[in-house]
């Protein structure tokens, strides 16, 4: 039976990006949180206080389950409160309800981040009216976490509308007052001010927590505030000194608050984490030594606390240049951590020990890598204390150190190069699984280099702190293909590469300047020129991109002769080899296409989705002769169409939101949203009949440039849906350009070309045209992920 091809054309207004969620409507005869949590002076809600308190309690129980690792379907319906005759409700009761509503919206798969922010802002203001400092502190802290989480959807936009990469912060919003940061969040949340408001919210939480005598909350808010400032250094390195100074102040305030925490082990944990932040801000600060002494006093024999204290001692000794003391302390940390049933910090202590023992660096780094692999299955997705990504906190440093250490030793040794490739591949897999959940992205059989054909080249660009390394393997060697490494890595910082990618993408997205050309030349020389002799017009270059390179329009890179990379060869990107296979030859078999389109306004709890222009034309082009077109489709239409028999291509011309999380990704149908999980179920039914899903196309999505996690949204949507391949757009493209490229792709694909070949020919056809469609801002937006044949 033939493979399914899966096409999705996605067009979603940018404002809806903040509203992505599995859509769940409230009962018609119930009051929704929006009506209860309005800011400002509003009439009392038509609900009774007891019902509101009951809903608050139910929501708080659901939040506790979610934060403790519980899953399951959305519980947003718990927030609905039956309408009753209007009765006075105190600000305190409303504040508790709005805080619960905001937090549930933040953590529930059916929630959305924009409403979470709005409800939490209301909770902060209502708690202040009620004189409830503790409630204000809790709501402000949750607001800070919500703001730090960013928009909940990735890869959504309206076709034909030029959009900036990132909305600038409103210049009229003042920097939070040090005297009372709560003042900065009295107004409703304004788009583009998230970073400023997050800082204000965390500062507000700490201040109000101290007033309420909640030392734990005050210390935690200061810790999160310090970590926010330290993370901003990577975004604004020119402010590094001032940001470190501000972080150090936040840590000192947090340490003062932590002294008043009642539980010794909890006090030790927060003291240690604050001292760790101080070590990053100012390792010479005397507060670190005092914090370590406090941890020893509170440890009471607890191995985790004693290991943490020893690790901090080693880190400080290392910063002072005392390697001998550092080794003694870090070896003690490794020993003590090893006594725990779940030694979650062991990889980090081994990594520091490797820094203190340069004579054993490679061996210790690889030991850290093996320790990470041992604990990775049990490592929580987020840090239980700060809710930061454990991939960023614990995994990424170990993976990058392991790759760098192996490369330093590898030379041209095939065994070590193969080891580097395995580590990099594990790194890519772990990143996807961390972002989207291991159950959503189960690994498949990876591409076997020995199965590559002549002209097919696999390329791993590896971005290290001080250089770029390239690993590659070329097919056509009678089944003996193996990875090779270029003689030396190109000296360039990771940040410089990120800047080049940002410059190229932002220039093409804006379409108003030619800045992208210099970046396109530089990136070609860096990433492609070393292997350009191996590229063939009918061959395929398969790239496994690293971090920011996922947002790079590789097709528009320019060689020394002024030719685009797509003019040299066919292209495909692979999120990781474990999620990619070359694909099957179609052998001239005709395509059976079902194309669905949405051509009306749709109102959902997540927002209003405006009528789309050009979707029927696109659907007709996709369906072709003998195909099926369904206008203004619903989920039942889709289910029936797929159940009728063999289908090769499913083309969805509609709004969609793919945010990198399957539980908050959906496509918009007529009056309803279809969660990605449900779509995956429909596809799974076909697979059970022997029809594998072959291709997913997101032809009007947008990948967030400059955000490593966000830029995985498209790849994650492809993998989660069960597709073997995907065609996606990195930014919004107008209707004329998108339809022209899709028509060209279908024409070539029906003629028997493989996916990479058909996309290349469609792009070359636009390049050869006169006028706007020949500009890379149109054709270079489209990229193929996964199987290329």
Image (spheres, rainbow, N blue to C red):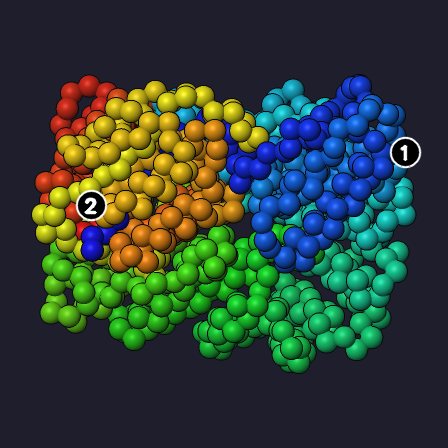
Task: Judge from the rendering whether residue 397 lies leftward or rightward of residue 30; answer left or right.
Answer: left
Q: Secondary structure at mark 2?
A: helix
Q: For this rendering, which residue is in front, 238 or 663?
A: 663
The one of 193 and 282 positioned closer to us in this rendering: 193
Circle 1 crowding by C-alpha within 10 Å: few under 14, some 14–19, many from 20: few
Q: Nearer the viewer, residue 137 or 465?
A: 137
Vertical side of 487 occupied by 310: above or below:
below
| Disc number placed over residue 131 in the picture, else none | 1
Secondary structure under tag 1 reads loop
Q: Which residue is mark 2?
A: 755
- Split into 4 quadrants, where in the image is the N terminus? bottom left
Residue 509 coordinates in the image, percent (x, y): 36, 28
What label does residue 154 carry, if any? none
Q: Nearer the viewer, residue 465 or 222?
A: 222
Q: Position of residue 278 (x, y in %)?
A: 70, 55
Q: CA distance from mark 1 to mark 2?
A: 63 Å
Q: Quadrant of residue 634?
A: top left
Residue at 77% from the left image edge and 60% from the top image edge: 271
């Amino acid at each position: 039976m033939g493979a399914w091809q899966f096409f999705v054309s996605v067009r979603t207004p940018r404002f809806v990006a903040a509203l992505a969620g599995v859509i769940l409507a409230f009962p018609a005869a119930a009051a929704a949180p929006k009506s209860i949590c309005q800011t400002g002076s509003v009439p009392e809600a038509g609900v009774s206080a007891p019902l509101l308190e009951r809903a608050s309690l139910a929501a708080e129980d659901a939040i506790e389950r979610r934060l403790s690792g519980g899953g399951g379907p959305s519980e947003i319906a718990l927030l609905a409160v039956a309408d009753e005759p209007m009765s006075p409700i105190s600000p305190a009761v409303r504040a508790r309800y709005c805080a619960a509503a905001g937090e549930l919206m933040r953590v529930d798969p059916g929630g959305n981040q924009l409403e979470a922010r709005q409800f939490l802002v209301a909770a902060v203001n209502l708690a202040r009216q009620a004189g409830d400092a503790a409630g204000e502190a809790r709501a402000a802290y949750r607001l800070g976490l919500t703001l730090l989480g960013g928009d909940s959807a990735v890869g959504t936009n309206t076709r034909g509308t030029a959009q900036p990469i990132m909305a600038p912060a409103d210049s009229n919003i003042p920097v939070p007052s040090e005297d009372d940061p709560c003042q900065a969040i009295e107004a409703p949340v304004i788009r583009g001010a998230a970073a400023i408001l997050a800082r204000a919210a965390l500062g507000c939480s700490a201040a109000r927590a101290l007033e309420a005598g909640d030392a734990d909350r005050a210390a935690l808010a200061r810790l999160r505030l310090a970590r926010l400032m330290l993370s901003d250094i990577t975004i604004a390195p020119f402010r590094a000194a001032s940001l470190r100074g501000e972080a150090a102040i936040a840590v000192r305030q947090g340490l003062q608050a932590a002294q008043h925490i009642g539980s010794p082990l909890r006090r030790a944990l927060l003291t240690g984490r604050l001292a760790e932040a101080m070590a990053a801000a100012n390792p010479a600060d005397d507060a670190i030594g005092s914090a370590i002494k406090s941890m020893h006093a509170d440890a009471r024999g607890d191995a985790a606390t004693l290991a943490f204290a020893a690790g901090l001692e080693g880190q400080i000794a290392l910063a002072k240049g005392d390697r001998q003391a550092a080794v003694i302390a870090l070896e003690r940390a490794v020993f003590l951590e090893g006594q725990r049933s779940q030694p979650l910090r062991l990889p980090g202590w081994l990594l520091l020990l490797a820094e203190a023992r340069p004579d054993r660096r490679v061996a210790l780094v690889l030991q850290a890598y093996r320790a990470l692999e041992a604990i990775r299955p049990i490592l929580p997705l987020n840090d239980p204390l700060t809710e930061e990504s454990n991939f960023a906190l614990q995994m990424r440093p170990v993976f990058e150190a392991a790759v760098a250490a192996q490369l330093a030793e590898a030379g041209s040794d095939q065994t070590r190069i193969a080891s580097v490739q395995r580590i990099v591949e594990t790194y890519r897999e772990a990143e996807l699984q961390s972002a989207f959940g291991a159950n959503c992205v189960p690994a498949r059989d990876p591409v076997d280099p020995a199965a590559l054909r002549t002209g097919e080249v696999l390329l791993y660009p590896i971005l290290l702190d001080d250089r770029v390394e390239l690993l590659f393997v070329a097919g056509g060697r009678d089944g003996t293909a193996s990875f090779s490494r270029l003689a030396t890595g190109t000296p360039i910082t990771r940040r410089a590469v990120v800047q080049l990618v940002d410059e190229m993408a932002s220039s093409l997205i804006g379409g108003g300047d030619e800045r992208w050309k210099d970046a396109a030349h530089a990136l070609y020389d860096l990433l492609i020129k070393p292997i350009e002799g191996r590229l063939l017009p009918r061959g395929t270059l398969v790239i496994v991109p690293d971090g920011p390179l996922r947002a790079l329009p590789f097709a528009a890179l320019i060689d020394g002769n002024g030719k685009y990379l797509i003019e040299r060869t066919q292209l495909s990107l692979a999120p990781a080899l474990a999620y990619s296979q070359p694909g099957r030859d179609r052998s001239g078999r005709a395509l059976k296409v079902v194309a669905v389109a949405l051509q009306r306004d749709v109102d959902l709890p997540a927002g209003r989705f405006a009528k789309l222009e050009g979707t029927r034309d696109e659907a007709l082009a996709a369906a072709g002769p003998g195909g099926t077109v369904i206008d203004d489709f619903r989920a039942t239409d889709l289910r029936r169409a797929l159940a009728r028999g063999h289908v090769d291509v499913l083309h969805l011309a509609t709004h969609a939101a793919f945010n990198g999380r399957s539980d908050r990704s959906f496509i918009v149908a007529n009056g309803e949203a279809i969660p990605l999980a449900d779509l995956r179920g429909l596809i799974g039914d076909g697979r059970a009949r022997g029809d594998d899903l072959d291709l997913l196309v997101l032809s009007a999505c947008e990948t967030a440039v400059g955000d490593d996690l966000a830029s995985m949204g498209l790849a994650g949507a492809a993998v989660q849906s069960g597709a073997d391949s995907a065609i996606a757009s990195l930014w919004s493209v107008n209707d004329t350009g998108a339809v022209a490229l899709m028509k060209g792709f279908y024409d070539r694909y029906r003629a028997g070309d493989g996916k990479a070949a058909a996309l290349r020919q469609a792009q070359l056809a636009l390049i050869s045209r006169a006028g706007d469609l020949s500009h890379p801002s149109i054709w270079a937006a489209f990229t193929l992920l996964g199987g290329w044949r």
